[in-house]
Amino acid sequence: MATLAVDRKSALRRELESIVGRDGVLSDPDELLVYESDGLTLFRALADFVVFPTCAEHVAAVVRLANREALPFVARGAGTGLSGGCLPAEGGLVISMMRMNRVLEVDYDNQVAVVEPGLVNLHLSWAVGPRGFYYAPDPSSQQACTIGGNIANNSGGPHTLKYGVTVNHVLGLEVVLPDGELVWLGGKTRDALGYDLAGVFVGSEGTFGIATKIAVRILKKPQAVKTVLAVFDQIDQASAAVSAIIARGLVPAAVEMIDQLTIQAVEDAFGCGYPRDAAAALLIELDGLRAGMEAQAERIVAACRESGAREVRTAADEAERQLLWKGRKSAFGAYGRVSPAYMVMDGVIPRTKLPYVLGRVNEIVAAHGLRVGNVFHAGDGNLHPNILYDPRKPGEEARVVAAGAEIMKVCAEVGGSISGEHGIGLEKSDFMPFIFSAADLAFMQSLKAAFNPTGLCNPGKVFPTKKSCVEAGPVAYRPHAIEERGLAQRF
Amino acid sequence: MTMAPVIPGPPATSPAPLALHGLSVEGVNQCVHCGLCLASCPTFSELGTEMDSPRGRIFLIKSLAEGRIGLTDSTVAHLDLCLDCRACETVCPAGVPYGRLIEAARAEIERQRPGGAVRRAFRWLNFGLLLGRPRALRAAAVGLRLYQASGLQALVRRSGIARLLPGTLPAWEALLPSLPPAADRAPLPPLTPALGPRRSRVALLTGCVQSIVFGAHNQATARVLARNGCDVLAPAGQGCCGALNAHGGDHARAIEMAKRTIETFEATGADAVIVNTSGCGAHMKGYGALLAGEPAWAERASRFAGTVQDVAEFLAREPLRGPLAPVPMTVTYHDPCHVVHGQKIRRQPRHLLAQVPGLRVVDLPESDWCCGSAGIYNLTQPEMAGRLLRRKVRNIEATRAEAVVTANPGCILQIEAGLRARSLRVPVLHLVEVLDRAYRHA
């Protein structure tokens, strides 16, 4: 609960209004309530204020005020995050970036766009689309999520397989540092000199400051696109097909897997054309030059058939392709048709472990008396088990958290990681010791302290807390799974 | 401003189904908070505040029903600012029945905050008298026609005296439609017989305000349907379908109006009930849900709702019958919210326009984005309505179309007002008027 005394709160409100204007500050209880969660409703916290800056100077002034008053603050975009990363600490400021949503400049010759952080991801592609360009990172929430939020979480998306994640597309950023200073990290060219601070900032989950301008690469739209839907009667066949495709040296732009529960939910939502009786489907996309694409597609079709696909078809036109993608990208929301709430996990595993891990996920969730839907980036082994639950049933939230922790452990044990693209936030902070040693975490803490010495900028995220219901206390060194497998070495 | 304390956390269990004013809002539990609706919401897009987004409003409605918050000034303001355009329903993967939730919330607002005597009288005048009794509406129309034909309106507008009126009255005055002469307001004949081979026997909702302000649309609709082989019945006893009442929180009267509408149209024995206004069509298709709580009516209402069709939806089921004369102009199509979002009719109007020879249709950016009319929203929320209207007009200008085609009287009035304010001479036509023109010149 918010804890500010009434007179201090009204004085602060007046001061915030003097920075961002009267209509730029929220402090009514019902208004703050709406900001208590992001896309993950498992975690809730109330701020004292939500403020709406419209320029970098506003952001800097608000941050300086927060420092003077020792109030925690956190930036928020569209609030579609899935790890509680933009939740306020109890009390303090939420700084909404939604009124900074312009495309500031586009240099088509050099393929660079400079945008504000509140710009919706898809709107950038719309803005540069008429000239034949697009912005490649495409999180499933791209119709609503913001570029600023993508920066915080180093977001991925289905096309990550070929094009990489957000950090591969950011050239530089203007940032308000946690003490209120305004600096540029990186620039607008490919090879900025000095330390790659833009690279350090991307994925720092709002703990290193608040981006106010972002220079990103825009890509020329591919000459040709081909989208293949492969349908399987057993989920293991689909997993095998993923490995078969990659083993043939093919690099599709995307390889997505959707299981039966999820197919049925998205078919109820939009009637996208996935067969309801399939155990699993793969959505595979090729893009690039027209020459040679047909041959590649044939090899993919063959790999799927040899793995046991009962049906493989290619989207006949752009409308069918769009509809298939709409189904894939709306999957999380579609779970609302089968359950009042869900928690999505974001584990990453070696592709070869797919059949084993999917089996374990099902066992773990069933053992906790819950249901799970799977829809994920199979090509790069980025799982998204969505555990369905009803928050109104006593004890279910605790069971979800416990099942989630066990799944994360399995991912770590097979040499994977606890997050591919959703960020650590609040949700996974206590799982960090599954992956990192105490020394690893201490080094990360010292980097955080260099940017954010007071800790007021987005506190309580990324690092494990002592309040943990999973694994508490200081963490002893454990070799990371990839060390044990001899894939990495500590120096 | 009243403030209620926030009770932290949702209750551990929720034994009773969630409801407001006796209307179920269980649909809130379908919202999993994914946020995919945010960017499709016109008010969120303008303001960036999540209480003015679908997800935020659903959360407010849920919190109200759970008793976490009370109905404060602030909560009422955010719920009132909703256009009820239902664009969020189109993008919602979870299928949250948003329109029903906001209607329940508005009914609860009316129950708890009926307002002072002036507001109550105003609502009675509109929802009870004018919409409830066709004859009263006709009498009011005569008065309005007198106000306009006498030159009094021109005088009021020139003098700027309207700006001195209290509350939202200046906005009401500015949007008063210019009433056509009595001939255009004459009721349709009870039967307009089919031309050529008979395809169907349909009944037309001539509407309450529609029949007075846009009688010409009804006449054009009847002619186009007749050209396509329909006997068109226009039952004389019909009144208002109750859509404006339901959208405005006047639930009790909305139920009575629905029952009367069902009785009137059932008696015609028509194969289909054709509607050429967006809010009415969407609302009548929802009669099943509206009357679900009344055992004597539930099934009957569902059956009736199944016969309701928007005029474009009905016509597009078969190719238009010829001959159609060329209509040589460039137009752009604006999707009325309760056609495209409320009834999911997007393809059909474009398909019909494509069959008119010589007509060039250019895409309107944000064509399915509310123009700000939204029933009586432009009267109750003139500021936001004005922002959305200016956005709509900017998009129309960018198309360089010679005319705007749409399919709803509210949108036509609103967009005409917006174009007039920019001194643009771009007519706004109902889809059936374009088809009628092609038939009449053939």
Image (cartoon, coloured by chain):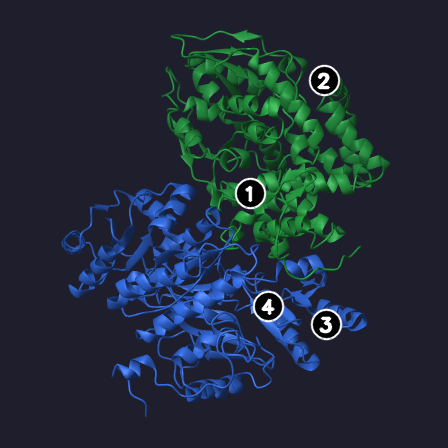
Chain colours: A blue, B green
The disc, 2 or 1, on the residue closer to the chain's N-terminal end is 2
- Residue ID for mark 4: A55
Q: Is residue A162 visible?
A: no
**Quadrant showing the C terminus of chain B:** top left
Q: Nearer the viewer, mark 1 or mark 3?
A: 3
Q: Chain for mark 2?
A: B
Whole-percent x, y for residue B203 in the image? 53, 15
Task: Calculate the distance from the C-alpha at mark 4 to the C-alpha at mark 2.
Answer: 54 Å
Q: Are marks 4 and 1 in contact (CB under 8 Å)?
A: no
Residues tagged by mark 1 and mark 3 found on one chain of the structure: no
Q: Element at badge 4?
A: loop
Horizontally, is A8 left or right of A413 in the view? right
Q: Nearer the viewer, mark 4 or mark 3?
A: 3
The kind of residue tagged 2 is Arg
Residue at mark 2 shares a chain with residue at mark 3: no
Label 4 is placed on what type of residue?
Cys
Secondary element at image label 1: helix
**Label 2 belongs to which residue?**
B138
Q: Residue furthest right?
A: B117
Chain of the residue that carries numbered disc 1 in the rendered image = B
The mark found on residue A3 in the picture is 3
